Amino acid sequence: MLIIDCPYCGERDETEFSYGGEAGIARPQHPESLTDAEWADYLFMRSNPRGPHRELWNHAQGCRRWFVAVRDTVTYRFSETAALQAGASGDAE
Amino acid sequence: MQNSRLPSGGRIDRKRPLNFRFNGHRLQGYAGDTLASALIANDVAVVGRGFKYHRPRGIIGSGAEEPNAIIQLGRGATAEPALRATQVELYEGLEASSVKGWPGVKFDLGAINDWAGAALAAGFYYKTFMRPAKLWKFYEHFIRRSAGLGTAPSLPDPDTYSHRNAHCDVMVVGAGPAGLAAAVTAARDGARVIIADEQSEFGGSLLASRESIDGLAAPDWVALQCRTLTNSKNVTLLPGSSVFGYYDYNFLGILQQCAIEPGAQNPGRIRQRLWRVRAKQVVLAQGAFERPLVFCNNDRPGIMLASAVSTYVNRYAVRPGRRAVVFTNNDSAYQASLDLHRAGVNVRCVVDSRPGGAGQIAESLREAAIPVHCGSIITNAYGRKRISAVEVARLDLSQRETLECDLLAMSGGWSPAVHLHSQAGGSIHWDDDRHCFVPAPSVQPNRSVGACNGTWTLATCLLEGHEAGLAAARNSGQRLPRDQFERTVSAAPKPANDAANEHATTPLWRVPGARDPERLPKQFVDYQNDTTVSDIRLAAREGYTSIEHLKRYTALGFGTDQGKLGNINGMAILAECLGKPVSAIGTTTFRPPYTPVSFGACAGESIGSLYDPVRKTAIHRWHEDQKAHFEPVGQWLRPSHYPVNGEDLQSAVQRECIATRNSVGIMDASTLGKIDVRGPDACKFLEWIYTHNVSKLPVGRCAYGIMLGEDGMIKDDGVMSRLGEQHFYVTTTTGGAAGVLAWMEKWLQTEWPQLRVHLTSMTEHYSTIAVAGPNSGRVIEKLGCDVDMSREAFPFMTFRSGNLAGVPVTLSRVSFSGELAFEINIDSRHALDTWLKLMEAGREFGITPYGTETMHVLRAEKGYVIVGQDTDGSVTPVDLRMNWLLSKDKDFLGKRSLARSDCKRSDRKQFVGLKAIDGKTVVAEGAQLVTGQPGRIPARIPIPIAGHVSSSYYSAVLQKPIALGLIRAGHTRVGETVLAIGSNGVEVPVEIVSPVFYDPKGERQNVQ
Ligand SMILES: [Zn+2]
């Protein structure tokens, strides 16, 4: 079981968290102007890398805040967790 | 009669004899025995049958590595399959039976397989399963009966199981010399230590050792360390506890055997406890497994591992034989010959494959006058149910000689127990000097010490343990100041026999034979899976040259055994076939659990009423008093119906429906999800979430709303009330409440953090009472209500705040039944009181409580969908003909997806009503809808499914069955007859109709 470092609460067991998929998938500003393929890209396509993966986690059984984490999909190690920056789609940059 | 019990010695309590049964025989052992040692004391040689060839098998080992003595413990509710007799502590009244072999251990049908062995060579099962499927029906009965490792109990387990979470600085796995040294040292540094050992007594190999440490006999040294640990407040000792899994972030699973005896004699007593430990540092000191030697008939009862022989003699004071031969390729087995000799067993000789023989220990054998044949091997064993003789030869197979004996102690060297290191993600590498896999550097904070690190001498094991305990304690956090620490932590323990001059192990992966292995009697590599040398050679010939493929083809290392004894020999034999070094073969993956874990322990306390929390509404007690029937909805318990005078479900629902339609019904709707949405941007936020025009909703009005996922599919629905310009109150389905709130939060936090909106769950704070029917308004008025209930002052889809019987409430004029209806939202503290007053006031109108069943019928009569029943995550609002809810003036979540080509297909499954042609049949919910005439379904396999029935009831007010469903292009097929086919296969012709069955003009919600 993983340990996840909530930026608001500190280290907690994985069971307190829920996973929210890849981070940085911004919702398009004008969906109606997109082609089906462009919309499908936003809707369905994810990077699924081998190695570090930027993803969203929610401290569901704690502070209920969403945050960004970088997790290695091979070793399951978290190298970083950070609060969301005001902006878009959990993109901390 | 314990014929093979030694007259003295052992760590057993001779004052406490214990009676037990094995395969129906009454036998006796002593407290402190394992089932295995007690069986040896009683001369039971055959304890099971081989898995595939059903050959008689005896006890080989003394611990977790035992492959043969797999037994079924107890019977009935407390039966436990697949246990190792070597790990079962004896208790009074124990009942055990062999699980292998059918119909019995002594006479075994499957033994015919032994003579017909060629048919069952490697890949037999694999090939059988892949070959004509028809034949499988024939094999299955036979194979299923004759294979398997026990029978699962069919009754509920009366025992109690528990879970415990724990944190520690240093977790020590294994309480042999290295583990004890590590734990004592770490504890002295003040670290919080947990030390676990799978045996009921700490000490590991030292319990059967004749060495001395720090001037104490080994068992006394163990006792001293245990006292030190027990007296340390910062140490938790877990004997009888198997560390079965090592997971990410130093998280370990431990199965603790709290009570050895199963059964409910002691209510509340914990049988097993599953520990979930998070450790800062881990010291792995699990020891090593002795390897068997591979020669002809090496599976015969009476052939044992040399270390197990020492354990049985020294620790349990039993004699595994009367005339013994020892066969080894290393020094360690010499000790077994000395132990046997001291116990009065006639040791005929030690057969050592190494031309140079052993080091220093060989002198002790000379003193004991035990002959040693160096450069010699055992080539065959004779005797079926117990060996009677072995064949000894020189390495070049010359000078063959038959030696009579009933015990062969063997040692093929040692394999470190690298399982947990490997589970933790660490790799292992082959050591060409020690001829075994040893741990490579760890990837998690752990250290392997002692024999599991490939360290064989006691002095080095103790030193490694001491140093690892020190390092682990220091790395887990600084406690004692340095000078104090150095004073406290003394030097590593030292054994008397410090500089043992050992001769190296010489590999002997399989004993050479005069002919090819295929033409000699079977030479077993993996006892539990009956994998032989020829199986491995066959697999290699057929191209299964990767160790992972070999494993799957021959079953080497499968099952509960996980290759503890056989894997290394198997890999080396494969390497020989391929002409490669062993290091080039690699090893298979080690996976948890290391030893089996019972389902009871996995479930722990989470069974029965503790399986999942139950949520009850504020009015629940009243429903119970009325003997309502309940159904679980999510975690909630909701009344499904209120039978009176012994009514069945159908009659109760019909009565409740009619009463509501004709006068007034009342329902506890408190489980609806309720979310308070407020803030300057509340309206803007809800515009994204809901499909309708939220900004156009005036304060004081309600609106039905749906929300879609970004994929355009219906996610949830409910009623939105606008309490103020910046304040909304929305309801969700009962099951969707938590998910919808979390989903809204995600959008708010991740996509629109600039929006100033607060979301608060109100589900428990407010109770909701639905009063429905033509007399609903009158009942509410009777309670004393300062809201003008007239139709004009209080129109449909509005809400009013006021006082009802002196209690502040919000009344909403909304309807899920099509009748005039009100929802009373009230502080949960007042809910039951108000409910009682409504029942009292409604008596003159025959007010009737109704449950979820009636609610479902009433809404289905009106064609209202229930999200999750009539939808399934693949239904768009267009499929439901809810286009009127989709705003054209704004974007909302999922809007763009509705324009995707798939959502615009004309043959999508669409929402329709269904009417049974015979006017009588209530079709089954879930029935498939098929295009065609009765008895004339197009003969295509599979039959094309056009749709399914999602809701189906008998409507009391219409006096006929009604149903709702989804069917391809349904909106254009009204009037067509299709077939509904349920699981009983009966074809019911149904006509596609409008989903609104009752009051299509919607006049009833304004009935005065
Ligand atoms: Zn948190």
Image: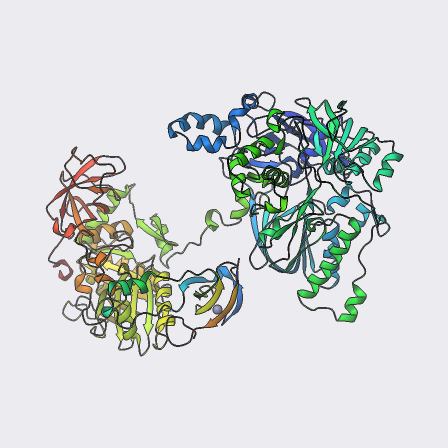
Measured from the top left, where is residue B367 in percent x and y?
89, 35
- Position of B641 compared to B304: left or right? left
Horizontal side of B635 relative to B418 (left or right) equals left
Image quadrant in which the N terminus of chain B is located: top right
B821 horizontally vs B342: left or right:
left
Taking depth in this image into account, of B678 and A88 the one nearest to the observer is: A88
B137 or B196, which is in the foreground?
B137
Residue B107 appears left or right of B191: left
Residue B671 image position (x, y, % from top left): 34, 59
Q: Which residue lies at the image location 66% right of the left edge and 22% below the top edge?
A: B384
B398 vs B854, nearest the viewer: B398
Q: Which residue appears farthest toward the bottom when viewing the image?
A: B680
Q: Relative to A18, is B496 above or below?
A: above
**From this viewpoint, which residue is outermost toward the right?**
B367
Q: Is residue B984 above or below residue A3?
A: above
Scheme of image coloration: rainbow
Image location (x, y in percent) of residue B595: 59, 43
Q: Is residue B1 something one can see in this rendering?
A: no
Residue B748 screen position, x and y as percent: 36, 71
> Image quadrant for the C terminus of chain B?
bottom left
